[in-house]
Amino acid sequence: MPVCDGEARPRQGRFPVRFGTAEVLRDLDRSDGWLLSVDGVAQSYVDLADPTHLEFDYVRRIADVVDCAWPAGAAVDALHIGGGACTLPHYIAVTRRGSAQTVVDADPLLVSLVREQFGVDAVPGMTLQVGDGRALTRSVADASVDLVVVDAYEKGVLSGGLFSVESTRDLSRVLRGNGVYLANLSDGPGLRFAARAVATLSAVFGVVMLVAEPGVLKGRRFGNIVLAASAVELPVAEVAARAAAAVFPSRCVMAAELRALVGPARVLTDVEGVDVPVPPTDSF
């Protein structure tokens, strides 16, 4: 079901939000495609006429895992930390009718903008809340969701505290036995933060998978990395096939290859503090 059906359409413009200035731009190549950015950093792309169109490659890779982890059309209960324009929640609502989803975002002005511009309150089964992701997670019951998605940034910089082992354990707590954790992070040459994030996930979950474009994996450029983790086997072959066939192909890295990639990285902790990678000015 498209959002904004029969309601006011989004309007282009610049709008003040908590973490900067948001801008809404229409995509001239698609009849109802819209880009949401904050301080020039792309936050979300949503096609209101076709929510299954996922413009950003990393969002498509996250959706690949969701598509392959459960039978087609099966409803899932999901918790999303970081909202933007709710691209992935809307995709899940359309492709998996009956899903119950909670989305939490720390920017109240951005949430108000997204509600007004993109009609997200009309997305079936989705609840959008303003708040701190970690604080909200503490109120979520044990083993109550199938999917956790972490995709939270402030001014283009990763919300690193969500990746500490303490936060990760709490997020794993709310997952059901066959649940899946997914995260989007960005990193550059050396993959120092990604390595520590993988070490942290490995300390909490039994199975960890990394998906990224070869240029990012080889340290040639700064870019997005998708991490998936679970207590059960992940659909590696299916996701790898989709990633390899993409317009901008990505690779799935697992097991021994993943351990070799990250090396002797330390687990991220609240006590030590989390230093996140700062993207170069031309990254986005």
Image: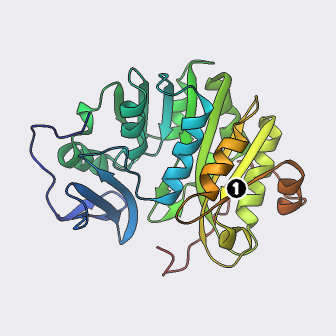
53 above or below 193?
A: above
97 above or below 233?
A: above
260 above or below 137?
A: below
Please give left or right for residue 215 compared with residue 49 in the image: right
Q: What residue is at 39 percent from the left and 20 percent from the top?
A: 98
Q: Position of residue 159 (x, y in %)?
A: 55, 54
Please give left or right for residue 215 compared with residue 139 in the image: right
Q: Residue under label 1, please give it.
A: 273
Q: Position of residue 48 (x, y in %)?
A: 25, 47
Q: Position of residue 27 (x, y in %)?
A: 25, 65
Q: Is residue 130 visible?
A: no
Of 9 and 55, which appears nearest the observer? 55
| Residue 8: quarter of image | top left
| Residue 120: quarter of image | top left
Q: Is residue 183 visible?
A: yes
| Residue 260: quarter of image | bottom right
